[in-house]
């Protein structure tokens, strides 16, 4: 069983067949699917699942804090089930592939006191950008 499914069961989330298939589609490392990709994969497993059900389920998972919504460069939102492990994202500037990365150190420490403007820092989102191996070999 995936970590996401275990977390949802632990919360007592009502596990309908539609919700289960969405959670199963999101299972795994480096998963950053769009809602349409989630729907396509879910429909392969459960053909009667509607696009609205997928969107509603994703919205619930985000509201519960079990899935992160990731937006990069005006592309479609992607959904990341790695919501409980601190990580950053590495994004291919050409194809949009996203990978989870775990840099050493705390990004909050990287912002000098003079650049905080009196803010009390609570978090930081760092996005690393570059070209993935496939795009490096075949630049646009």
Image (spheres, rainbow, N blue to C red):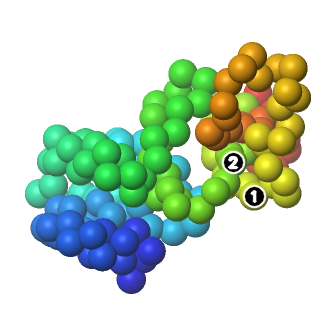
Between residues 71 and 111, which one lies in front from this camera angle?
A: 111
Quarter of the figure that contains the N terminus: bottom left
Assign a secondary structure to mark 1: loop
Question: Which residue is labeled 2 in the image?
Answer: 88
In terms of sequence position, does the residue under pointer 1 or pointer 2 come before the other? Answer: 2
* Labels in figure, total: 2
Farthest residue toward the bottom? 1
Farthest residue toward the top? 117
Q: Residues within 10 Å of mark 1 (few under 14, many from 20)?
A: few
Residue depicted at 62% across the width and 39% down the height: 122
Quarter of the figure that contains the C terminus: top right
Left or right relative to 87: residue 11: left
Residue 135 seen in render: no
Q: Is residue 64 above or below residue 70?
A: below
Instruction: State the image quarter where residue 77 is shown.
Output: top left
Residue depicted at 32% across the width and 52% down the height: 64
| Contact check, label 1 and label 2, Cβ < 8 Å | yes
Question: Which residue is labeled 1 in the image?
Answer: 102
Left or right relative to 28: residue 125: right
Between residues 39 and 72, which one lies in front from this camera angle?
A: 72
Between residues 66 and 57, which one lies in front from this camera angle?
A: 66
């Amino acid at each position: 069983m995936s970590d996401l499914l275990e977390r949802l069961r632990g919360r007592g989330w009502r596990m309908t067949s539609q919700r289960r298939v969405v959670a199963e589609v999101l299972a795994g490392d480096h998963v950053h699917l769009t809602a349409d990709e989630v729907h396509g994969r879910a429909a392969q497993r459960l053909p009667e699942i509607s696009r609205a059900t997928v969107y509603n389920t994703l919205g619930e998972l985000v509201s519960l804090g079990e899935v992160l919504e990731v937006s990069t460069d005006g592309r479609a939102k992607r959904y990341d089930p790695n919501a409980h492990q601190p990580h950053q994202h590495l994004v291919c500037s050409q194809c949009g592939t996203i990978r989870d990365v775990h840099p050493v150190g705390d990004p909050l420490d990287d912002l000098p006191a003079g650049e905080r403007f009196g803010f009390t820092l609570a978090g930081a989102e760092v996005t690393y950008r570059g070209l993935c191996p496939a795009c490096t070999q075949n630049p646009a």
